[in-house]
Structure formats: C-alpha cells, structure tokens
Amino acid sequence: EMSPEELEKIVFTVKKEFGSRLFLPGHHYQKDEVIQFADARGDSLKLAQLSASQHEAEAIVFCGVHFMAETADILTRNDQHVYLPDMRAGCSMADMANMTQTEKAWEKLMATFDETILPLTYVNSTAAIKAFVGKHGGATVTSSNAADMLQWAFSQKERILFLPDQHLGRNTAYDLGIPLDHMAVWDPIMEKLLYDGPLENVKVILWKGHCSVHENFTVGNVEQVRKEHPTMQIIVHPECSREVVELSDLSGSTNAIIQAIKQAPPGSKWAIGTEMNLVNRIIQEHPDQHIISLNPRMCPCLTMNRIDLPHLAWSLESLAEGDPQNLIRVEDSIAIDAKKALDRMLSRA
Ligand code: 13P
Ligand code: SF4
C-alpha cells in the first residue's frame, strides 16, 4: 500500500517526464485527488473538442468515464493513444442503449413513421451507438448544445429519435416549444412505443434511458428546499426529470452550472442538482455564497469515482514503464461512422 504522497509523486514525476507528449483531461465530476492533476477540466463538449486539438500528445490518459475515452480515441489521430485508468469506469446511462435494442427499435419506428426519423444521440452513449447514428445521417449532442442540435435535426427530418437519455431529450424539446403530448417514449425492454395520441403528432421519440445519479434529485427535494430556504435558487443538470427542471430556477450542463455560480454576487444562495464531487468543489470555491446539494444525501457517480489516485498513478506508471495498460481503441469500422456523428456536432459547436 502506497501513501497518497507517494502516489502523487508518481503522477508528478510521469507528468514531468512526458511533458506535452501526455495529455490528461478531467471531467468536472472527477474526485479532487484526480482533478488536481488534470491538464484541462471541462464538460463533455469541451473535453471532446480539446482531445481533438491535442496534436502533440502521444498519450491521453482520460479521467472520466469509458464513453468519453472512446470519443477522445475517435477524434484523435491513429498514432495517439487513449487510456482509461480503470476499465470499470462505465456509465449506466450509456449501457441503457445497446446495438440489438437500437436496431430493433429503428426497424419498427421507421416502419411506423414512414422513414421520417433522424437519430440523435447524447454523447453519453457507446461508440457503436454513435456509429449507428452517424450512419443514418444523425449527430451526437451534449448537454451544452442539445437545443442547437435538435433544431438542426428538425431542419433535416420531421421526427427525431433521441438516445439514450429521455430527460435531456424531453427537457430540450420542451424548451424548443414542442408540447409534451407530441413526445413519445420508446421502451427498449418492452420493445414498444409508449404513446396515447395520434401518431402523426409525434415529433420526438425519447429512448427510455436515464442517469442513475440525476434521478436521485426529486420533486420532494425541490419542495423541501423551497420550504426551508425560500430565497434559495435551484439549479439542476438537464439529466434531471422534466418535473424537477420545471420546478427549478435554472438548468444547464456542468459548465453552465459552474458559470452561473461564478457570476453570482456574494451572499447568493443555491441548491445544486448534480453530481457530488462537482457540488463539493463549487461549495469550496465559493465560501462567500451559501450552497447546498439539492438532495441532502449528496449523489456520487460511482463509476466516475472509480478513477481515483491509485488508479491514476498505476496507469501513468505503466505508461512510463513502456507497458501502458487499459488502451481504449474503437475499431475502425465503428470509429469512421461514429466520427461522422461527432463531426456533425463539432462543426456547429
Ligand atoms: P456534461 O459535463 O456535459 O454536462 O455531462 C454531464 C455528465 O453526466 C457526464 O457524464
Ligand atoms: Fe453516466 Fe450519470 Fe455518471 Fe454521467 S453522472 S457518467 S450520465 S451515470
């Protein structure tokens, strides 16, 4: 067992040795013990863009979850290598849409709606799903550009299939003025469309997936905050349910949440509905404001947290020893189509 000091020393030493040949992106949900070493912090969109621009980096050690490392691999050159410090750092939402389910859904929906559908996928999805979407003319979206991308999608086709997060899809479509009764839900387990109205009214088909972290922020939490802190502002991530977003004051990507609080005057009061590590960091960085988690229990993303200091040090050590572990390599046949979906987004970002 090594002490935190010894582990930190390994990280420092390898980072120094590699210089700009090594790039270490860190998502805002990463632990402090990891993010302190990140060369760049960001939300999913920023990290995707940055990975694409790291021309000098031979190795990218991604401090985030599996789909983010896959995205970095797809966007970088073939001789650049992406590593994930712990292969178990997945995303339960990305796992809610697999290829078999998606192909079945597509076949049924295209028949039902006479081929008038364009697929969009949240970047929180596997490379295979991104490739499926890219192959069918669609694009990826992130929580910071979902509205722009949905608007673009409607300029292409009459209807959108939105994978895999029903909440981001519903919240974004609602903001664009699409009524809730024009949104259907595709249930991939039951293999059926959940919708009561006339089919011609359907504008958006929401995949029945969700984030297991953000589902912990409830209407009950909002009511509690309103009762106990009447002057507090509530800001949540759009992976929260429609009801929670509706009752909140603001919603936005991790970056939008950080910016809103940065721009608020001293003495401001906030309840934040997003992942625990980010909420704790915002609290520490703004001692002049009164900030709490919307859910008093605090909500960690367990898979994000699998990237910890021991795994980071182990990963960098393996790199320094010339035997790098945990390579993330999306096979070419998938990467080519997935890149089409990502490029359609990045050219508009
Ligand atoms: P953003 O950082 O893009 O808002 O994404 C949040 C998230 O859940 C990443 O897994
Ligand atoms: Fe996936 Fe939710 Fe964790 Fe983000 S916070 S990585 S969407 S499980």
Image (spheres, rainbow, N blue to C red):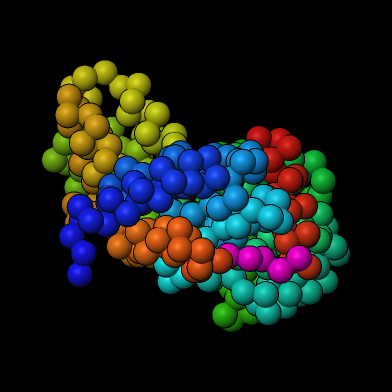
Between 194 and 162, the residue placed more toward the observer is 162
Q: Position of residue 250 (x, y in %)?
A: 40, 35
> Eyeballing the image, is 88 above or below 294?
below
Q: Position of residue 115 (x, y in %)?
A: 85, 63
Query: Can you name the residue that lies furthest to the right here?
Result: 114
Q: Is residue 291 magenta?
A: no
Query: Can you name the residue that lies furthest to the top here?
Result: 265
**Could you tell me which quadrant the C terminus lies in?**
top right
Q: Position of residue 47 (x, y in %)?
A: 53, 44
Res. 249 visible in picture:
yes
**Could you tell me which quadrant the N terminus lies in?**
bottom left
Q: Is residue 329 magenta?
A: yes
Q: Report the residue at 53% width, 40% height from top.
A: 20
Q: Report the residue at 73% width, 37% height from top.
A: 347
Span colored in magenta: 328-332
| Residue 201, image quadrant | bottom right
> Eyeballing the image, is 86 above or below 69?
below
Q: Report the residue at 66% width, 66% height from top.
A: 330
Q: Is residue 150 left or right of residue 326?
A: right
Q: Is residue 83 left or right of residue 231?
A: right
Q: Is residue 266 left or right of residue 328?
A: left
Query: Can you name the residue that lies furthest to the left here?
Result: 228
Between 326 and 249, the residue placed more toward the observer is 326
Between 143 and 335, the residue placed more toward the observer is 335
Res. 118 visible in picture:
no
